Each structure stands twice: as C-alpha cells, then as structure tokens.
Image: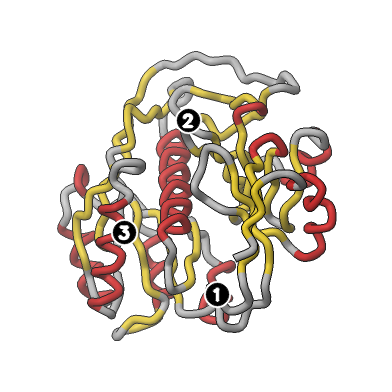
Amino acid sequence: MDRDPAARRRLRTQLRALHRRFPVQIVAEADDGRSAREVLDTTAAQSAPHIVLLDVVLPDGSGLAFAEEFRKRPAAPQIILIGPSDDALNDAGMLDVAATLRRPVRADQLEGALRTAAARHVAMIHAAAPAGMHAGVAGIGHNVGHNVGPNVGPNVGTAAGPAVSHSHFLPIVPQSGRDAVAVDDILFLRAELKYVLIRTRDADYLTEQPLTRLLGDHPDRFVQAHRAALVARQAIAGARRVAAGERDPAADAYWELLLHGTAERIPVSRRRWREIRPLVAGLSLDLQ
C-alpha cells in the first residue's frame, strides 16, 4: 500500500525480479487505507495477502495506525513498513511488524524483509495448529498483495520430530517439520524484533534465542558485525567499502561484508571493524 504510483511500480518490478529466488504473486494494490481495507475484507481466504507492504504516510491516515488495525484482524497479514527516513519509522518499534524498510528500497533488503515476514507467517500457522500437529510449508508460493502478501500455503501433518538440543544444532521456531538447524549451515543471524532471523543457503528460519547467547555458545563460529547481527566466519567472502553518502546522504563511510551463499551484504559497525578486519585479510576487498 503506497500513495505514490511510481513507488508501487518500482516495488512491483522488484518483486517480479525476485520471483526465481523467492516466488511471489501480487494479489492487490492500494493507494490508501480505505482501499486496503476493502481488499482484506473482500479477498477470498485462499488468495488473501499474507504480507502487506505498507507506506507509513498515507492520504487518509498514518500507516502506523493502519498497521495496528490490520494486526488485530483474525487472519492478520504480516506487515512490512516502508518510510522515507529512519525518523519516520521510529515508532514502528512499538508495533509487532515483520520488518521496516527505508526508501529507496534495495532488492536485497526487500528480499530479506519478505523472507522474515514469510517465516513469521509460517510460525503463526504452526502456533495455531492443534496440539501435536506441525504446520508445515509444502512450498512457499507467495501471494503478494501489492501491498504484498506472499501466500504461504500450509500443510498440516504429523511430523513427529524430537527437539534437538545438541550443541551442533540450533533450536528454531518449528517450520516444515524441523525443530533445529545445523550451526554449520548458518550464514548469518540478525535480530528482528522478538525473533532472530537465521539465514542459510537454502532457507530462512527464526529462533527465540538472543544473539548474546548464540555468540557466547559459538564464539569460534560467529563474529559480531554490529549490535544486531552475527556472521559465520567461514561464510565471509570479502568486504566492500561503502562511500560516504552512497546510500544515505547523511551516512558516513562504512564497510560491509560479502558472504558466500547469499547476495545480502552485512554492514559492519566502526567498533566491530577492528575485530573483523583480520578476518578479511587476503580476501576480496572492494574499496570502491
């Protein structure tokens, strides 16, 4: 949901470009809150958007207010808020939204936000399943309300998998019958509201374990890139210097990590760069 037709066209183009790696189906678009309500009220359950991309500034009200309203619905969609600046998104932390994005939205950031929202939706399905049942995902065929709703088709089955507590595995919010992922498969972890997103080469997962504990349990496996992200040491492919003002006119220069197995780049805080710099010695260093 976005008041700007040009912004909606850009998002539509980005979603279609992501289709090969992250299949989505755009089911609706809206330019204000009233139109979005009509979409959610009239769309059949099987094709209703499960994720909504929501502008924080709308012609008929605040996007934050609409996000709160939508979250109270029985089949609440996951919300990704989009704003023109960090200031505009400051109050988003008070809401249970899947992610926030600042314009201009990069394709890798959009993909990461969608994966987080889809994983949260799967977790919601699992939580609503009867006791002893797992809400699995046969395949995420995403329905995107242009406001975006990846439609995650649930399969409810009896996947009796014991919880894995071995130190080489990390417990996750159950997904597709899985209770844990191998630590060696993890590329990076990022705190997002009350969950931590786990990125592997093949899929995204969520865990409720805090980053501080994960780093303490696996100090030789992960390194902290900034306060909200851990990166697997063996996944680091190199680093790139982002010039001052390149992505944000007000931002200073900083380094970002390039990782094997994912196109997403992880920014490194100035404080953490001292620790990480030896790890990229001899690897690809892009100074441009």
Viewer-proximal residue among 81 and 35: 81
Q: On the rendered structure, is 2 left or right of 281?
A: left
**Residue 246, disc:** 1
Q: CA distance from mark 1 to mark 2?
A: 38 Å
Q: Position of residue 131 (x, y in %)?
A: 47, 25
Q: CA distance from mark 2 to mark 3?
A: 27 Å
Type of amino acid under label 2: Gln
Q: Position of residue 78 (x, y in %)?
A: 40, 54
Of badges 1 and 3, nearer the viewer stands 1
Q: Position of residue 203 (x, y in %)?
A: 47, 35
**Residue 67, disc:** none
Identify the residue under disc 2: 175
Viewer-proximal residue among 74 and 107: 107
Type of amino acid under label 3: Gln
Viewer-proximal residue among 229 and 274: 274
Q: Is residue 2 above or below residue 278?
A: below
Q: Position of residue 148 (x, y in %)?
A: 30, 57
* Numbered circles on residues, count: 3
Q: Residue at x 63, y 42 (%)?
A: 237
Type of amino acid under label 1: Glu
Q: CA distance from mark 1 to mark 3?
A: 20 Å
Badges 1 and 2: C-beta atoms under 8 Å apart? no
Q: Quadrant of the C terminus?
A: bottom right
Q: Residue at x 74, y 58 (%)?
A: 227
Pointer 2 local density, CA inside 10 Å: few below 14, some 14–19, many at least 20:
many
**Residue 14, disc:** 3
Q: Earlier in the sequence, mark 1 or mark 2?
A: 2
Q: Residue at x 17, y 54 (%)?
A: 43
Task: Give the image quarter of residue 41.
Answer: bottom left
Of badges 2 and 3, nearer the viewer stands 3
Q: Is residue 252 above or below residue 164?
A: below
